[in-house]
Image (cartoon, coloured by chain):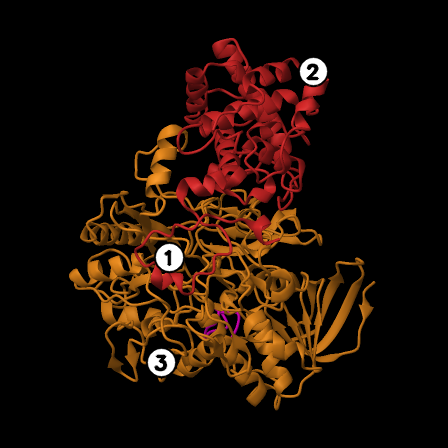
């Protein structure tokens, strides 16, 4: 399925120049469907916390990590950018379940996350660094790059070959990949995995997951029932 | 100033498995017991209900049921010379919080230790010589032997309704059960769970190699079950949401599903939630804990609850913290080797695994029970194989199975697959339903430099120092991991898979990020010698007669097995000593 209602790249170009209407969702937002439905234009859900520039980065990034092909729509068309916006705006983004007392010295990677930033702040800094790096390297913000250059830029970050101030590009990339996969595979109630696209791609049946008989009757056999999600039982 | 409350017979600190068991045994005996739980109330009906109990993001990833590190965490350094830093986000291990504790969100694997795990030091010395154990390996015997503890293992298995098959019934070895286990007086209370495809593949390969495959004992009900408390558990739905989740079907044993219904109905028991125990009021002269001070987290008010008997049933780290703060026992010093409190902190040598891929086999990983839903071997566990010349002691239980197919965290791809992009999508779609792991959970034997004490810098929400963990893997662990990695490779090849990963072997520093196991042990260890242990064989503190310490913090070292079976058995063993001996004649049950 292809996005028919609004050409995303044009939308993103608009977002990058920062028009207020687009940054807050704009008229297109009113046309979007509820989360969990297969509305192709739903990547223009109104934003809770991401700036237009950040949103453009996230859309371009998740569409590179999860490109559209015969297996699924693109990451953003599956709601992953919406998911990330909502997660960063909520308890997780604000640092829930994160011990935040200092001091915060440099630490070995095996000691885990040791920064003073909450996830929202971390992604703000990381996106800024990533765009600064692609401007230095390619002369443009990440979302303005060709598909090939986006892939190369993400690979450079993944391999820690992009130089970021403060924390490593690999650390940023790993966090970006993690939250992208969360958005692609979590229950659609959070705005990602729209129409259970991620679950359909792998064949995960979702809910209710009561297989007392099926564990025997489907032994060695593909379980082919269509997936269902929390909304289907609420 | 804390408000001083009226004295009660007994206080249980923490209302998880051990707190619930002790409270039940003590109230049955006629005592008035108060249970102090730092978290909120949690019930199956309200908190573990469909459909939201299947929310993978909320429970498995955002850690809804675990200890909140904003309130409390531990710090880590790899050796005594380093500065410890706080574990800011849980990863490697996941302590619980709230009624039920970690018992609400565990997987349900319920082992007994091998007889030779119980008398570990003397067994190794007898078999391999007095000098076989390196000086820095500070392993000990459990003061309670397997035979002594057998009836209490049995009792805990019946409370839980463990599903499994005996491999050694009163000395008779039974094929299909674990033939390496110690003699059992009774079979498991429930038959084994259904077989998974992964388990079937493992069974065939293991038999071809001459090993002894068996089903892991699972506190997931293979059929509806009424336990000796009269509580009925439902049959497992194989939903693939055990670990990190509550169970809506009461088919996974938990304090909620096994014991709290009777305990909460007993007016001799009073549950106080939101009651965060801050410190023990210790009278060193009298060798007695007079009271427990706690904060009501709804108001911030402090209370002092005097009690005749104190059951310390918090998680490993809080057990240590409360005793260290009160000064009950001498802090262990790794340089001099003096002091017992904080000594022999151990963990698990896990993270050894291989993923196998089968183009022509459907695995259905999402139809699963938590407790190692597959087949296991114990041929390379403990001292079940000859360690002459291998350069290490201990081993691992090896398991091939599926505990879930929740795709945020479980989506295996063959080695060499990129982590994202078109190729990743293709591989993920192709292999998700055609792969599983062979894993190994290894013994972790005590090392002189692995211990717990109080952090000098970082504090928790109550203003107390964090527990500082000084911990790393050492030579015994690395050699064990290499050896077991070789066994995993052999098993994987015998399965003849389409593709397989190379064995992931535990190397390098202990890393707090990836989940390994919530099998933290030690620091308040049980032993026969008050100089090297904190509690006696009845889990009574050597330095405080009315303080009994529950849980894996009393393990002198960690066997390969998940600790809950032993934790439950020791809880019943201690409860019996308290009700039959201590209450009649308060004082030390063992002369130090």
- Residue at left offset 52%, top offset 17%: A142
The span shown in magenta is B525-535
- Residue at left offset 62%, top offset 49%: B69
**Residue A208, x across and y down, in percent:** 51, 56
Q: Secondary structure at mark 2?
A: loop
Q: Locate residue B105 relative to residue B560 in the image: left or right.
A: right
| Residue pointed to by mark 2 | A19
| Residue pointed to by mark 3 | B187
Q: Is residue B545 visible?
A: no
Most common SS among magenta residues: loop
Q: CA distance from mark 1 to mark 3?
A: 39 Å
**Residue B469, x across and y down, in percent:** 52, 52
**Which sits in the foreground, B446 or A222?**
A222
**Residue A187, x across and y down, in percent:** 54, 45
Crowding at label 2, few (<14), some or many (≥20) Cα neighbours within 10 Å? few
Q: Are dots 1 and 3 on a single chain?
A: yes
Marks 2 and 1 close (CB-CB < 8 Å): no
Q: Secondary structure at mark 1?
A: loop
Marks 1 and 3 close (CB-CB < 8 Å): no
Crowding at label 1, few (<14), some or many (≥20) Cα neighbours within 10 Å? some
* Label at residue B136: 1
- Chain for colour red: A
**Which sits in the foreground, B231 or B361?**
B361
**Which sits in the foreground, B304 or B62?**
B62
Question: Between tags 2 and 3, which lies in front?
Answer: 2
- Quadrant housing residue B18: bottom right
């Amino acid at each position: 399925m292809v996005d028919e209602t609004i050409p995303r790249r044009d939308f993103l170009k608009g977002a990058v120049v920062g028009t207020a209407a687009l940054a807050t969702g704009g008229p297109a937002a009113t046309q979007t469907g509820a989360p969990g439905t297969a509305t192709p234009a739903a990547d223009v859900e109104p934003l809770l916390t991401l700036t237009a520039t950040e949103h453009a980065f996230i859309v371009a990034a998740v569409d590179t990590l999860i490109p559209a092909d015969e297996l699924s729509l693109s990451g953003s068309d599956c709601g992953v950018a919406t998911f990330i916006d909502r997660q960063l705006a909520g308890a997780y983004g604000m640092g829930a379940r994160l011990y935040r007392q200092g001091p915060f010295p440099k630490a070995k990677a095996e000691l885990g996350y040791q920064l003073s930033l909450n996830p929202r702040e971390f992604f703000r800094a990381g996106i800024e660094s990533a765009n600064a790096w692609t401007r230095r390297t390619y002369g443009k913000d990440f979302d303005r790059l060709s598909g090939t250059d986006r892939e190369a830029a993400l690979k450079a970050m993944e391999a820690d070959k992009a130089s970021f101030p403060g924390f490593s590009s690999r650390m940023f990339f790993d966090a970006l990949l993690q939250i992208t996969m969360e958005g692609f595979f979590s229950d659609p109630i959070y705005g990602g995995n729209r129409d259970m696209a991620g679950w359909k791609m792998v064949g995960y049946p979702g809910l209710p997951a009561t297989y007392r008989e099926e564990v025997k009757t489907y032994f060695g056999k593909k379980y082919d029932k269509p997936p269902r999600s929390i909304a289907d039982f609420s | 100033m804390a408000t001083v409350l009226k004295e009660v017979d007994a206080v249980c600190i923490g209302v998880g498995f051990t707190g619930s068991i002790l409270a039940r045994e003590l109230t049955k005996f006629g005592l008035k017991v108060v249970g102090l739980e730092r978290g909120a109330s949690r019930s199956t009906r309200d908190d573990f209900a469909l459909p939201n109990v299947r929310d993978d993001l909320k429970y498995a990833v955002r850690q809804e049921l675990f200890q909140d590190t904003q309130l409390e965490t531990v710090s880590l350094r790899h050796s005594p010379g380093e500065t410890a830093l706080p574990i800011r986000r849980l990863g490697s291990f996941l302590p619980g919080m709230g009624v039920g504790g970690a018992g609400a969100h565990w997987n349900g694997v319920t082992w007994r230790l091998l007889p030779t795990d119980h008398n570990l030091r003397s067994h190794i010395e007898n078999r391999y010589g007095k000098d076989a154990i390196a000086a820095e390996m500070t392993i000990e015997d459990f003061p309670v032997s397997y035979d002594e503890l057998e009836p209490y293992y049995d009792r805990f298995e019946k409370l839980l309704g463990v599903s499994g098959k005996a491999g050694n019934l009163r000395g008779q070895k039974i094929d299909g059960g674990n033939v390496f286990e110690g003699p059992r007086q009774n079979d498991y209370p429930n038959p084994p769970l259904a077989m998974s495809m992964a388990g079937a593949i493992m069974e065939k390969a293991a038999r071809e190699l001459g090993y002894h495959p068996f089903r892991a004992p699972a506190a997931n009900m293979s059929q509806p079950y009424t336990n000796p408390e009269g509580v009925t558990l439902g049959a497992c739905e194989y939903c693939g949401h055990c670990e990190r989740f509550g169970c809506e079907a009461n088919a996974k044993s938990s304090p909620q599903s096994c014991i709290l219904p009777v305990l909460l109905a007993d007016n001799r028991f009073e549950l106080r939630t939101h009651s965060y125990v801050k410190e023990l009021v210790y009278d060193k002269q009298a060798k007695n804990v007079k009271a427990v001070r706690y904060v009501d987290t709804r108001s911030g008010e402090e209370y002092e609850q005097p009690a005749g008997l104190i059951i310390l049933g918090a998680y490993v780290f809080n057990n240590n913290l409360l005793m260290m703060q009160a000064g009950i026992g001498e802090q262990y010093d790794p340089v001099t080797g003096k002091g017992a409190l904080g000594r022999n902190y151990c963990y698990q040598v896990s993270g050894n695994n291989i993923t196998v891929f089968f183009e022509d086999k459907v695995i259905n990983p999402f139809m699963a029970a938590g407790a190692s839903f597959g087949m296991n071997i114990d041929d390379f566990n403990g001292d079940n194989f000859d360690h002459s010349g291998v350069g290490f002691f201990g081993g691992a239980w090896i398991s091939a199975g599926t505990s879930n197919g929740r795709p945020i965290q479980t989506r295996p791809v063959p080695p060499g697959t990129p982590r994202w992009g078109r190729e990743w999508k293709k591989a993920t779609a192709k292999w998700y339903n055609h792969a599983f792991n062979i894993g190994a959970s290894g013994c972790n034997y005590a090392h002189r430099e692995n211990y717990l004490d109080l952090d000098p810098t970082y504090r928790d929400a109550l203003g107390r120092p964090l527990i500082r963990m000084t911990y790393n893997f050492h030579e015994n662990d690395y050699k064990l991991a290499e050896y077991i990695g070789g066994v995993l490779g052999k098993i994987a090849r015998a399965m003849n898979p389409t593709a397989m990963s190379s064995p992931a072997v535990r190397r390098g520093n202990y890393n707090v990020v990836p989940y390994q196991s919530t099998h933290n042990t030690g620091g308040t260890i049980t032993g026969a010698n008050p100089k090297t242990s904190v509690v006696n064989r009845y889990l009574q503190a050597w330095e405080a007669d009315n303080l009994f310490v529950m849980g894996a913090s009393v393990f002198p070292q960690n066997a390969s097995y998940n600790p809950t079976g032993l934790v439950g058995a020791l809880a019943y063993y201690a409860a019996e000593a308290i009700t039959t001996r201590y209450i009649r004649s308060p004082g030390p049950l063992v002369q130090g």
